[in-house]
Amino acid sequence: MYGRDRTLIYSHADDRDEVLSKVGLTMHDLFDNPSGVTYRYQGGRVVRRTPEKQFPQSGNKDDRSLYRVETLPEDRTSTVYVTEGEQCADALAVLGVAAVSPPQGANTAASRFDWNPLSDRNVQIVADKDAAGRKHAQDVAKNLNGIAKDVSIVEAKIGKDAADHVTAGHEVHEFVPVAVTNHEDPDDEFWNGRPALTHIRDFARARRAGPWSTLGVVLARAIASHEPNVMLPPTVGGAVSMNLFLAAVGASGAGKGASDGAGFAAVEFADFAGHKIEIDQPNIGSGEGLARAFRAPDSDDRESSARTRALIAVSEIDTLAALAGRKGATLMAELRKAYMGESIGFNNASKATTSAVGAHCYRLCLTVGVQPENAAPLLDDAGGGTPQRFVWLPVNDPYAPDVRPSEPAPWVVKFPRWEATQELVVIPDRAREEIDSHRLKVLRGNAENPLDGHVMLCRLKVAAGLMVLDGRSVMSDDDWRLAGEVMAVSSRTRGGIERDLFERNRKRRTANAVARGEDEDTTAATRIDKRLDRIAKGITRQLQKEKMLRGPLRRGLSSADRDDFDLAIARMVEEGIVVNHTEGNKEWYELS
């Protein structure tokens, strides 16, 4: 499409620059003037867009007017489109509609400009399809509140912005509405931190699935798409498998199936050659059956496996509990070994009964639907270390928009090329330092919560999944930071289950004691309540001085009270006495 001294192109198949290169053109060739396009504002601001996508300004830099504001029709019943950038406004003008844009892009506050010319008009804000663009659109919408007659936010049907939408051949009525909720999601900063994360949240909401559990399924698929030779480097002990376990937490029918469906449809994974990666999904069985999922029939330990990668989805925790509860069952023990990538299965004299699979010769990821009231069998295996190996994410979405948003096209991730021999993921120094610090606490007997025994390894695996989702083979500080936020959600989710189970058991014990004719004030449940009240008073005394991190706050209690810290603080948060904040993998508390 030609307009404003340059040609706009949009490629449906390949990267724009690659297309230009193949036909022997550069970005400079798209401009009539090699120096770029000049945009002039009514108030005297002059902006020049260079082929290198730089925007030097001259003239009246204090100008508060909008680009193309002088072209607005007198008829205020027609819709005005607000874009992010002059090029997009010009592209819409080619379609014969009114379009304006503030200068200086998404990083400049909308309040710096004059929106009064849009008074009493119907306005559609065309957001760029990235975190900054969506945030900018919300900012513009807030500034138009009380000025415009009606405001809505839309996005391009194809491409990133309005210019891509138009050059791909679409009209303004084909813009995709963006659902806006009246409740601000406290996790927006996390979801808007990367385009892929924003996409997963939006896709989950389009499918009415929980964003966190959908992310968990996507991360499990990302890990399961890699061969087992890709491993995490030695940090504590030796190299370890990236195998990832997810507990999707919610009441029966709350959405584990929806999360699975959204997690499989939201993202497509391809190898370095562009071939789509498919993942086998065998059913779970006994501990021995777990290993047999990776062996060909009638094979022994010297023969190659029939399958190297698998993603097992268990819809109900009851299924896992029933299999693990059989007499002589080895399932939980085998799962714990599988999480680490250790050898699983058993070698027997007969090929027909041999099921052993060697260490780091298989990739196994597991997702389990966990109803809080049925979670006891999993949590009760803490002594063996099973619940510590799971990432616990909720299937609900308290901030789901009232109107279901349109479903975006699948996000495509192309993996880098990995060697066939053992490949160790490169991790940042910050991760090594924090892992080492946590390990020292464990060695010295100062671990804050027995259920956090594998928290750093879980976090490292989540960071690896985020790295893979970004199409990289080297882990960044940002991967590690974001993984800390995921683990903070995991800790809160698991803590909620523990609290629910505790309250259920407390009520049952109280009811049993009363039925036996005991004085209610002497029951064990009541004694525990009094104990938690005493701990809460100790927490309150500390927080009256200043807000505190979880670790120092817990250590401020007597050693006898620290084991029940999580139950006491969870109850205080639930009752509104205390507010908790997350910063990376750290949790702060303060009096509300």
Image: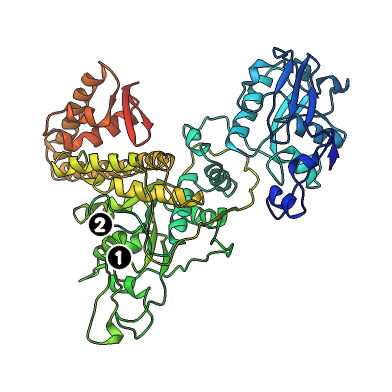
Would residue 279 appear left or right of 485 to someone viewing this image? right
Tell me the tag on residue 509. none
Q: Nearest to the eye among marks 1 and 2: give it.
A: 2
Q: Residues within 10 Å of mark 1 (few under 14, many from 20)?
A: few
Name the image quarter holding residue 77.
Answer: top right
Instruction: Kindly indicate whether the residue at mark 2 contacts the one at mark 1 (C-beta within 8 angstroms).
Output: no
Instruction: Name the residue: 34% across, 86% down.
Output: 298
Report the residue marked by disc 1: 322
| Position of the N terminus by quadrant | top right
Would residue 508 appear left or right of 417 to someone viewing this image? left
- The kind of residue on which mark 2 rests is Gly
Name the image quarter holding residue 497.
Answer: top left
Instruction: Name the residue: 70% across, 39% down.
Output: 161
Nearest the viewer among 479 and 32 is: 32
* Residue 399 drawn at (x, y percent): 51, 36
Sequence order check, earlier mark of 1 and 2: 2
- The kind of residue on which mark 1 rests is Ala
Report the residue marked by disc 2: 238
Q: Secondary structure at mark 2?
A: loop
Nearest the viewer among 520 and 398 is: 398
| Position of the C terminus by quadrant | top left
Would residue 271 appear left or right of 47 to someone viewing this image? left
* Residue 494 drawn at (x, y percent): 32, 44
Name the image quarter holding residue 384.
Answer: bottom left
Q: Residues within 10 Å of mark 2 (few under 14, many from 20)?
A: few
